[in-house]
Amino acid sequence: HYDHIDEPSDEIRKQLKDVFGLSEFRANQLEAINATMEGKDVFLLMPTGGGKSLCFQLPAVCSNIKTQGVTVVVSPLTALMEDQVSALTSRGISAFYWSADSPQHEVNAKLWSGDRKPALLYLTPEKIKASPACRNLLLKLYNQGQLARFAIDEAHCISTWGQDFRSAYQGLGQLREDYPKVPIIALTATANQCTREDIVTQLKLRDHAFFTQSFNRPNLKYFIKAKKKKNMLPEIVEFIKKEHPNHTGVIYCLARKSCQLLAEQLQKEGLSKEEKNRLLESWKADKFHVMVATIAFGMGIDKADVRFVIHHDLPKSLSGYYQETGRAGRDGKLADCVLYYWFPDFKKICWMIDQDKEREEALTPEAKKRQKDAAREVVKYCTNISECRRVQVLRHFGQEFNQHNCKAGCDNCLDNRPPITEDVTVVATNAIDAVRSLSNKGQQITQRQLTEVLRGANSNMIQDHGFSTIEGYGTCKHISRELVDIALDRLILLEILAISLQKQKTTFSAEYLEIGSAARNFKAKGQCLQVNWRPPPVK
Ligand code: ADP
Ligand code: ZN
């Protein structure tokens, strides 16, 4: 007999309020909580920031005959686990992250000492796979009927379909075999149909309840605007004055240097956590309207009436972009999301990834590649001016936007000038030749210089470097400067050209071009290069 409960029990409601300080559930939260507390397997597909954690954290603090005891949370991200554990602990919930370097006495005290079990135990998949002590504990809990449920966060890591595949996640299929009575809740923000089926199969979910929602945010308007210079604050101020006087909004910047004053102030080492919180609190309390934040800062923002989110710099990934823009319009009313795009931001992000700043452990080459690919995807999004933005964003999450065109909800649907497709293969082949012949001679060239070379300029720079004799000089005379530049950007994006960074370790300034890894293929296969653009209006 299975009773479906749609109303929250008194206990669930009480814990939501008393422990988590929240008044209402978001879409799917209550349904998922009810199902997992019923002992069912659950698959929860929700956007990042949608509130997935609550769906296993709240049941973990509710007493329930069917699923009592410890909730075991598996996550690939140690930093995220540490954050969650400290947030839970500060709410008076007993939670423990058993990390690789947890001291043994602490593990013993938390996990092996009789009745004082934590409500939530956080583990990496590697821990479950490789630690006999960990498996012993799980088995002991299981035999005592004290394993409440497994929460598999970032469940898509189990699938080789996705780019976040983690081999240790595959071992999690064993959980169902070893602890057959324990319900599983799988959570993820990125899963297309294939990945979804793969997750269900590999985790051996049985008769599970599946919850998802459209990732579309119909009240958000998406705009990509050209970023013409490093600092767009004057334009932004203009935009806010005109479109959003006295409205609440957030401006995101990539790094401390890219925004003036406030962002710098926020990011400064000297700014304590308390000061950050105080600023966030005064913003929430409407003491000032616009918050300039770095991407890392905005995590706790949950203010309903945010009317605009501006990306002053390129977001690092489409998921990040979705999450950051998603902070606008939580009240369901219209809100604007404006992204200022220019290609140098992509180069800057790649440079930051290579510098690997502000991190303790070095990124693996694969991780660097993944991060660059994520940024690459954002550039493709920004430069795809022929498809509805909503279609593009939703496709990233494996969803279709059924209307195909959101009418007035994005810049591409609003602009009635069709984009022009230009064949710029001649730029590509000559750029490759020029860079190659220069590097054979041990010379270097920047992107700006290459544009002048290809267009056959006769400037001092060309004279000084003797660039007028190199291959490709003047071959793109007939193509406008803007278009040559767009073509070169595209070549860098496609890794046909690369940027050499070894010369400047500390600042991001002059950057020389190199032949990229995809150049050989491009030439060998006789590929074409096409770009879409809207030429600037003739003055
Ligand atoms: P996800 O795991 O889906 O990325 P989180 O669980 O980290 O998202 O939640 C994102 C934010 O939403 C957190 O700040 C959380 O406190 C908040 N949140 C979750 N559920 C609710 C709710 N019902 N009401 C208000 N805020 C919520
Ligand atoms: Zn659209």
Image (cartoon, rainbow, N blue to C red):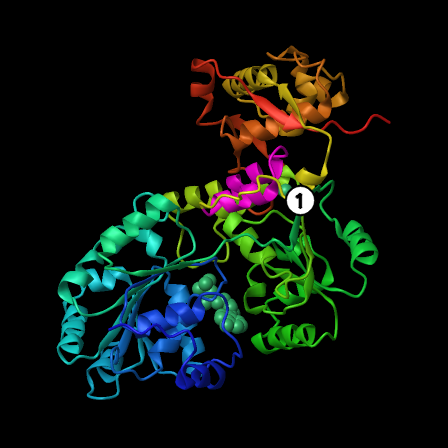
Q: Nearer the viewer, residue 361 or 169?
A: 169
Query: Does residue 100 appear to the left or right of 437 in the view shown?
Result: left
User: How far from the left and from the top, in percent, is residue 281?
Assistant: 64, 76
Q: Nearer the viewer, residue 347 or 508?
A: 347
Q: Which residue is mark 1?
A: 410
**Predominant SS along the magenta part:** helix
Q: Is residue 349 above or below residue 150?
A: above
Residue at 18% across, 72% down? 138
Amino acid on which disc 1 is placed? Cys
User: How far from the left and from the top, in percent, is residue 517?
Assistant: 44, 27
Residue at 55% across, 61% down? 296
Q: Is residue 300 above or below residue 371?
A: below
Q: Nearer the viewer, residue 158 or 107?
A: 158
Residue at 79% across, 52% down? 239
Residue at 36% across, 81% down? 61
Residue 44 shows in the view? no
Q: Is mark 1 within 8 Å of ligand 2?
A: yes
Query: Does residue 86 appear to the left or right of 335 in the view shown?
Result: left
Residues shaded magenta: 375-397
Indicate whether residue 199 is drawn in magenta. no
User: How far from the left and from the top, in percent, is residue 538?
Assistant: 83, 25
- Quarter of the picture containing the N terminus is bottom left
User: How far from the left and from the top, in percent, is residue 208?
Assistant: 29, 61
Can you name the residue that lies furthest to the bottom here? 115
